[in-house]
């Protein structure tokens, strides 16, 4: 049956505001604006009460189950934060914990307008199933990593990564499995090349961390004579694109390599600031024609999964650094959080509101003091809006968040499971 | 009659969480925690349903009526933004416009937990009366300025400033009048000295812009052989303290002068980034023992009045700049937004929750996915909370915001007046 999201305005791909309604047939948008044809059969009508529908936000780099570790290790620099605060807790995690952390994170993301996330974490089968059950979209992966620089491929691990991409199935197609290389510094070249070769069959964009810290970037240069992005590209890992998180220390040459490979840099401004990693050169990357998306990273270095905050930060901080109020336009930031993220994750059918696209959107109530007057909707969304202005989130035409309620999630059970997992991990609250 | 805010937790001045209730007699806190003595007479009980009460936030630098100009001139650098986008519209403003913009801004601030604002704008009598009618606290001023560098005091203007401080009266004492020097570059030395001398009688902290842009700072040095802060101090303007907005280019010497004078630097991170002004050296100022508060600046350079966003930005951006995750602690940022702002504005009786203080607080609903788990409440408030987590805001013991409702404000009338003012100013929406 068709569903009509009535009484709304719609953000167009060029950041104008069009009149609704949005008419959805099964999971796709079949009409925007105009009269609804009653002769096409019965419709269910959802009254959006004047809200503005915008494309569902795309979180192009996250570790969702780290909701369990929200704020753990605050104040520590990246390497100590990982080794002293994060890894010891993660070593205790079970698939059950990941499942609880993912559902909790999905609730937070849906409440803040996110419809698709790139998730990199352990127990991706459990995580992927948890995402699928919520109805949210996710690109999940078995993380390719080995803890010694000189390590040969742990043969089991490479096989696990390939088997995961081959075997993971979400019948609804909302959750897909990708290859992942944790980073240049936590993999051997043999592992990277093994995954690149296996991907010739699947042709998926690859998830990886690159050039997050100056130390990591410099050590790669010293070790391999190449930057992390150049090295991964030379291994063939980016032949089908990639979503490359952080890129704080990426060079102009890296921007060119990413552009040529069709890979996307994923900017995580909160995490990069909170861990003291630095500022990715986003205006320069955009000027070089390289695609840039946005991510939250995990909840232990953010400490939330709120893409409105990432948009806000990205739009502001690069103006401050460049001392140029025109350094990064609000419209470019909106694209980073929507269509660019969708392209990064190999999803050509989402990230924009147009006929033929999947019906993935969120609706914002603009009838609030902080959202009036509105002279420019992109500016309003990036500089003034809050995640809490989202009143409804829709994925593949299904309502997953509706004014505080989660039609596909048992919120009480999710809270119970989440708190039990926090306790099981020995994290007192 | 006493009022008991029951079923809550309370953020203490040392950023711990204590058990409620908060018992208020008239406008003051008379008890925190423990059993309520029924033998002291009848009490009205307000159920906070488990919320966390924190001190009302203090916006130590704003131009509230610029809600009317939210987002106007986005993308322009400070001088062009002022001269091309802002001043031409402001030249048309009437007291009626200011009144409408102030009430709208007060609604936005109350909804985001702000109880006290330092407001610098034209028509302060109208603005001050509008604040007083809402029940919110404000330090207002007649702006001391003259548009020529070599201008003598326009005698009328100096007298207006002094008369305003002398004559403005809010019987409830919530709105007070202070002296204000717009900036070194928009005043003559004679005007600055005249206001400083007049203030010997009133002994109020003075509101001013200082060292916002590099150009302004350098031109002051060239013109006067001193930085703006040193110059204003030498004129006697800071003899009773001050709240000095921006201080982006303030030197170590300026930090020492401000500390010695008991003046406060007001950090406006969003505005300074959005206009490309730069980054104030806040960790250095704090290390020098100088008091730092937080402000939003006006809505045309922010584009909202949300101190949770300012806390979030301040906590993150200085870590990024210093590349040190310990550069600025969450607790210091909370103090900037509360007790430091209160001290800056000469309000010793607000900014912290303790017996004997005014009952100025907001209550946050922490029962949301993005606010759990909580390992450290200061971190949670600064990195994860949103303004919309505020469910109630209380000033002098009166509830001014309650789950979307404004008991002291006719919200429909406010919206009508605000939209009429926007239209009158020729700003299409």
Image (cartoon, coloured by chain):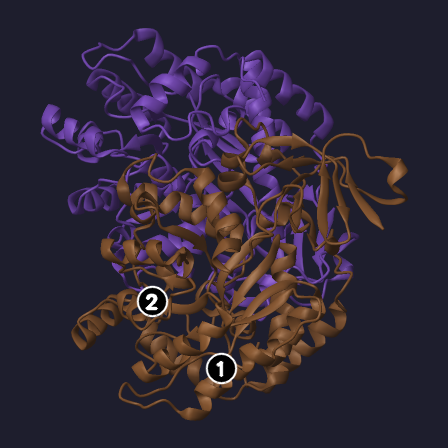
Chain colours: A brown, B purple
| Corner quadrant of residue B145 | top left
Q: Which residue is mark 2?
A: A210
Q: Specify the subunit that label 2 lies on.
A: A
Q: Where residue B381 sits in the image (x, y, percent)? A: 52, 59
Q: Which residue is mark 1?
A: A161
Q: Is residue B234 shown above or below B306? A: above
Q: Earlier in the sequence, mark 1 or mark 2?
A: 1
Q: Is residue B126 left or right of residue B405?
A: left
Label 2 crowd bin: few (<14), some (14–19), many (20+), radius 10 Å: many
Residue A215: in sight, yes or no? yes
In the rendered image, the quadrant that contains the C terminus of chain B is top right
| Corner quadrant of residue B220 | top left
Residue name at image x 16 percent, y 74 percent: A222
Q: Are marks 1 and 2 on the same chain?
A: yes
| Corner quadrant of residue B22 | bottom right
| SS at circle 2 | strand
Residue B279: in sight, yes or no? no
Q: Is residue A391 left or right of residue B311?
A: right
Q: Where residue B157 sits in the image (x, y, percent)? A: 35, 11
In this rendering, the label closer to the viewer, 1 or 2: 1
Q: Specify the subunit that label 1 lies on.
A: A
Q: Is residue A32 shown above or below A170? A: above
Residue name at image x 70 percent, y 52 percent: A394
| SS at circle 1 | helix
Q: Where residue A3 sits in the image (x, y, percent)? A: 81, 46
Label 1 – label 2 distance at C-alpha: 19 Å
Q: Nearer the viewer, residue A14 or B351?
A: A14
Q: Is residue B127 left or right of residue A242?
A: right
Q: Is residue A280 shown above or below A120? A: above
Q: Where residue B125 sits in the image (x, y, percent)? A: 51, 18
Asked if the residue at tag 2 contacts the one at tag 1, i.e. Cβ–Cβ closer than 8 Å, the answer is no
Q: Nearer the viewer, residue A202 or B74?
A: A202
């Amino acid at each position: 049956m068709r569903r009509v999201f009535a009484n709304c305005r719609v953000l167009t791909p060029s950041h104008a505001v069009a009149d609704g309604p949005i008419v959805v047939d099964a999971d796709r948008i079949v009409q925007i604006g105009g009269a609804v044809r009653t002769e096409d059969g019965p419709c269910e009508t959802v009254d959006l009460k004047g809200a503005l529908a915008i494309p569902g936000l795309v979180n192009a780099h996250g570790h969702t189950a780290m909701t369990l570790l929200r704020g753990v290790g605050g104040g520590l620099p990246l390497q100590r934060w990982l080794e002293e605060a994060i890894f010891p807790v993660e070593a205790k995690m079970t698939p059950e914990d990941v499942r609880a952390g993912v559902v909790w994170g999905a609730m937070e993301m849906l409440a803040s307008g996110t419809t698709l996330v790139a998730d990199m974490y352990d127990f991706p089968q459990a995580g992927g199933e948890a995402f699928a059950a919520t109805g949210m979209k996710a690109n999940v992966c078995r993380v390719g990593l080995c803890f010694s620089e000189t390590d040969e491929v742990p043969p089991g691990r490479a096989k696990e990564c390939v088997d995961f991409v081959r075997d993971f199935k979400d019948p609804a197609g909302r959750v897909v499995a990708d290859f992942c290389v944790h980073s240049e510094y936590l993999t051997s070249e043999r592992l990277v090349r093994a995954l690149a070769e296996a991907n010739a069959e699947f042709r998926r964009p690859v998830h990886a961390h690159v050039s997050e810290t100056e130390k990591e970037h410099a050590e790669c240069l010293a070790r391999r004579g190449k930057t992390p992005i150049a090295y991964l590209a030379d291994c063939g890992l980016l032949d089908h694109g990639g979503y490359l998180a952080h890129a704080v220390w990426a060079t102009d040459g890296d921007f060119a390599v990413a552009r040529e490979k069709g890979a996307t840099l994923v900017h995580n401004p909160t995490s990069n600031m909170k861990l003291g990693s630095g500022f990715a050169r986003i205006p320069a990357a955009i000027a070089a024609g390289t695609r840039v998306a946005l991510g939250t990273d995990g909840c232990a270095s953010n400490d939330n999964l709120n893409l409105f905050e990432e948009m806000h930060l990205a739009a502001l901080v690069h103006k401050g650094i460049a001392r140029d109020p025109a350094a990064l336009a609000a419209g470019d930031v909106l694209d980073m959080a929507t269509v660019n993220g969708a392209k990064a994750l190999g999803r050509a059918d989402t990230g924009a509101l147009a006929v033929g696209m999947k019906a993935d959107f969120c609706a914002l109530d603009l009838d609030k003091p902080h959202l009036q007057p509105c002279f420019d909707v992109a500016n309003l969304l990036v500089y003034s809006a809050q995640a809490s202005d989202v009143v409804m989130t829709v994925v593949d035409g299904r309502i997953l968040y509706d004014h505080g309620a989660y039609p596909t999630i048992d919120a009480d059970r999710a809270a119970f499971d989440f708190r039990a997992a926090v306790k099981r991990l020995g994290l007192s609250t």
